[in-house]
């Protein structure tokens, strides 16, 4: 190897070290520092508490399976939170057609024959989707009210209170955060 | 409001934001790469590294510097990943095997960010931050440096040098990427992207049972992951994970970031060659292809949403169809490869469109830097073909496109299709690689072809059903990423060396202008014909056959 190439390699090595300190050390530390200055709720994962105990994050859906709670979307990982991801199934795959048909039947059986909206039939990309569509939440409201012995109107009002429209009126989709909705539901039941 | 109206307004806001930044950022980048003075922090860097920032390099030395820096980066990152479990802060990570570690090191250094590991279990916070975040910056800065070297060569007259790689690398990192990433990182943090060093915490969930809440220095990585058109997710679900992309606003910001520099560089180009109309022409070309990709992907998914499941498999409720397809077309068109929805679950034509966007050669508008030099190669091919048609010596910006110049461009164009088609074919005839496909039939072909198109184009997105963490896929994809990145890059630098020596010829009445709508049409035609001739048979057997069956 010529001496000029060796010089270049040594320069590359030093450049790598110096840029690592700047971009892999100082930069992430600075953003971390901003997080400590008043943004720690977001920086730490938007955790939600019940009675002072952390019971999840408002950004991460949970595996609600009982009739008493609103149920989130199907998940490839059942919301375990250890490894995220989707099913990668595609519409023409036989597994997927069977899964969709089974979920539609189960949804109708649990919710007085209601037709399942798309989000109730399909698994999300992350397996941690915290949101469902407002139609999905409304269709589950009668079942949830019955299972908790609550007035149906009160549960419908609760869903309405937790329905978020599109941001700025046009960004994203209307949605209901299932974790926050169920947290409020539990409080309503406890009263 | 219907999904269509909200989707169109979202695209409108995105375009407005890009338009507002187009001129200032393009002009700033032109100033950065042309500036004769150094910032104080840069002087300190040059002194530590012991390079002379005021000397310039010819194309060979420039190329040696690019290769030296990339080789050092690959080896050190590979080493860091191999020893990661012996360092502090492992936080329950399982680490990576040797072929996975090599694949990952190559992947991040080549600006591909293909991931055959799951971020949650494969990489410790130290690898994520000290290793991968750094490559997110510098691999992007290397791409911009090579693009700028080519532009300088086109603009200079009878010269020898094309710039100083170390200066271009440092300035791209310090003056362009770092400030924008810092602002974007804070905005993402406000939006809910996490930034902490907490170990994974298992909580008793509201739903009953346990749930793991993970942490990580995600906001700082997410910002540069999009801005540098890298795309390697902190988590396995990438930008679909609520901790990487919590809401519709962060989603729009992430799409904006990945399009920002590739589009603005066309302005930089126009300024540096002293004719802004040249930049407008390239912007028009890239913009038309990008818009076509968005339209085709969205139309395919909207058409599929009539079926059971409403095309929502693998998509997040907070984004819905339009914000997912807008992301998908932009991430594949910019060689980013981040995803906010799972492309394998798309309809046949939706998945086929995002695949096509990649095999165009990442020019709509392509990755930071690599997109611009990719477009310039197509432009050189276009003037050559036009020259053949009218029997004139082809010229580009006054420089003659002779035998040696067009050889560089032709070889550039050939590298990626050879890699994609040869390795896809091999994977389909060998029993081992075939056994790790999730799908069979046409969808299976698309799955494998997508992987090699993604690797060879330095995109990094996946039809994620393919189990790619096997020695075969790790090593062949690593080969595709290295060859797909550095062979074209070296050809571009060789071309720069040829162009810089020429004295431009004055334009005459017979010179074909390269700033007119007609030239944009010619460019588009050449790009589509080259990709169509190469890939139509494979696309016909994959997504098109699936859509028709």
Image (cartoon, rainbow, N blue to C red):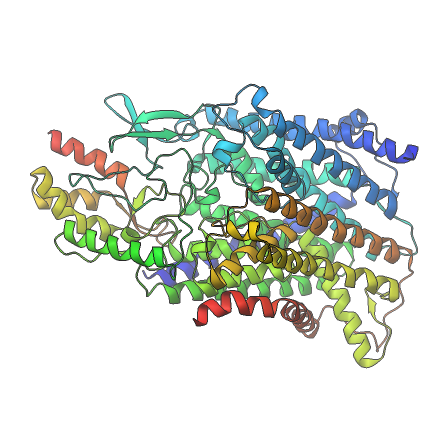
Query: Is B512 placed left or right of A108 in the picture?
Result: right
Q: Which image quarter is the C terminus of chain B in?
A: bottom left
Query: Is A130 placed left or right of B486 in the picture?
Result: left
Does residue B362 appear in this view?
A: no
Residues B413 and A50: in front is B413
Q: Is residue B224 above or below residue A13?
A: below
Residue B355 x, y percent position in the rendering: 55, 60
Residue A172 x, y percent position in the rendering: 38, 51
Residues B38 and B359: in front is B359
Q: Is residue B391 above or below residue A157?
A: below
Which corner quadrant of the image does residue B373 belong to? bottom right
Residue name at image x 30 percent, y 61 percent:
B308
Residue B543 x, y percent position in the rendering: 50, 65
Which corner quadrant of the image does residue A30 belong to? top right
Query: Is A149 placed left or right of B2 in the picture?
Result: left
Residue name at image x 49 percent, y 53 percent:
B327
Residue B5 x, y percent position in the rendering: 38, 62
Which corner quadrant of the image does residue B80 belong to? top right
Residue name at image x 37 percent, y 43 percent:
A127
Q: Which image quarter is the N terminus of chain B in?
A: bottom left
Residues B262 and B42: in front is B262
Query: Is B447 placed left or right of B248 in the picture?
Result: right
Q: Residue furthest front?
A: B431
Does residue B93 appear in this view?
A: yes
């Amino acid at each position: 190897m010529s001496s000029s190439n060796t010089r270049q390699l040594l320069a590359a090595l030093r450049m790598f070290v110096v840029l690592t300190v700047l971009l892999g050390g100082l930069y992430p530390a600075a953003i971390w520092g901003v997080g400590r200055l008043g943004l720690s709720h977001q920086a730490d994962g938007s955790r939600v508490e019940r009675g002072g105990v952390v019971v999840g994050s408002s950004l991460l859906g949970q595996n609600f399976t009982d009739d008493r709670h609103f149920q989130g979307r199907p998940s490839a990982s059942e919301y375990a939170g250890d490894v995220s991801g989707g099913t990668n199934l595609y519409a023409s795959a036989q597994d997927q057609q069977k899964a969709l048909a089974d979920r539609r039947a189960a949804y109708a059986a649990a919710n007085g024959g209601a037709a399942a909206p798309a989000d109730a039939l399909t698994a999300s990309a992350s397996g941690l989707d915290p949101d469902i569509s407002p139609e999905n939440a409304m269709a589950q409201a009668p079942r949830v009210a019955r299972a908790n012995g609550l007035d149906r109107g009160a549960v419908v009002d609760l869903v309405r209170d937790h329905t978020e429209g599109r941001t700025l009126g046009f960004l994203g989709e209307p949605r209901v955060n299932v974790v926050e909705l169920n947290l409020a539901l539990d409080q309503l039941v406890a009263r | 409001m219907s999904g269509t109206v909200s989707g169109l307004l979202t695209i409108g806001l995105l375009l407005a934001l890009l338009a507002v930044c187009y001129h200032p950022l393009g002009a700033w980048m032109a100033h950065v790469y042309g500036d004769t003075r150094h910032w104080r922090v840069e002087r300190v860097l040059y002194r530590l590294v012991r390079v002379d920032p005021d000397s310039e390099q010819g194309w060979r030395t420039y190329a040696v510097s690019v290769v030296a820096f990339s080789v050092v980066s690959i080896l050190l990152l590979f080493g860091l990943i191999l020893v990661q479990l012996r360092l502090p802060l492992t936080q329950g990570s399982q680490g990576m095997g040797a072929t996975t570690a090599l694949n990952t090191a190559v992947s991040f250094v080549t600006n591909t960010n293909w991931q055959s590991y799951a971020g949650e279990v494969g990489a410790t916070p130290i690898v994520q931050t000290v290793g991968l975040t750094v490559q997110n910056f510098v691999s992007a800065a290397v791409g911009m440096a090579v693009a700028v070297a080519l532009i300088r060569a086109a603009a200079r007259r009878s010269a020898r040098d094309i710039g100083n790689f170390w200066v271009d690398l440092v300035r791209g990192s310090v003056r362009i990427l770092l400030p924008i990433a810092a602002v974007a990182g804070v905005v993402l943090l406000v939006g809910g992207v996490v930034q902490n060093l907490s170990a994974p915490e298992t909580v008793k969930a509201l739903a009953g049972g346990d749930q793991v809440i993970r942490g990580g220095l995600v906001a700082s990585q997410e910002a540069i992951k999009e801005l540098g058109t890298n795309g390697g997710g902190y988590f396995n679900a990438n930008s679909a994970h609520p901790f990487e992309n919590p809401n519709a606003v962060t989603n729009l910001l992430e799409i904006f970031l990945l399009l920002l520099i590739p589009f603005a560089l066309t302005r930089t180009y126009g300024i540096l060659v002293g004719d802004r109309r040249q930049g407008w022409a390239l912007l028009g070309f890239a913009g038309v292809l990008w818009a076509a990709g968005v339209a085709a992907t969205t139309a395919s998914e909207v058409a599929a949403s009539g079926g059971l499941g409403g095309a929502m498999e693998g998509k997040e409720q907070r984004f819905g169809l339009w914000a997912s397809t807008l992301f998908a077309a932009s991430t594949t068109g910019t060689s980013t490869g981040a995803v906010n929805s799972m492309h394998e679950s798309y309809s046949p034509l939706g998945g086929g469109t995002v695949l096509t966007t990649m095999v165009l050669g990442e020019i709509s508008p392509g990755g930071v830097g690599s997109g611009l030099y990719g477009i310039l190669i197509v432009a050189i091919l276009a003037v050559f073909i036009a020259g053949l048609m009218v029997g004139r010596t082809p010229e580009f910006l006054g420089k003659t496109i002779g035998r040696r110049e067009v050889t560089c461009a032709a070889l550039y164009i050939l590298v990626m299709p050879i890699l994609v088609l040869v390795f896809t074919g091999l994977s389909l005839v060998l029993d081992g690689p075939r056994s790790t496909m999730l799908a069979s039939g046409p969808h299976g072909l698309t799955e494998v072809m997508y992987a090699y198109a993604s690797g060879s184009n330095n995109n990094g997105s996946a039809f994620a059903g393919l189990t790619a963490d096997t020695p075969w896929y790790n090593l062949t994809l690593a080969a595709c990423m290295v060859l797909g990145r550095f062979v074209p890059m070296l050809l571009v630098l060789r071309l720069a060396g040829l162009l810089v020596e020429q004295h431009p010829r004055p334009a005459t009445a017979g010179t074909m202008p390269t700033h007119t709508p007609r030239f944009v049409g010619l460019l588009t035609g050449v790009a589509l014909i080259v990709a169509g001739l190469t890939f139509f048979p494979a696309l016909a057997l994959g997504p098109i056959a699936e859509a028709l069956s």
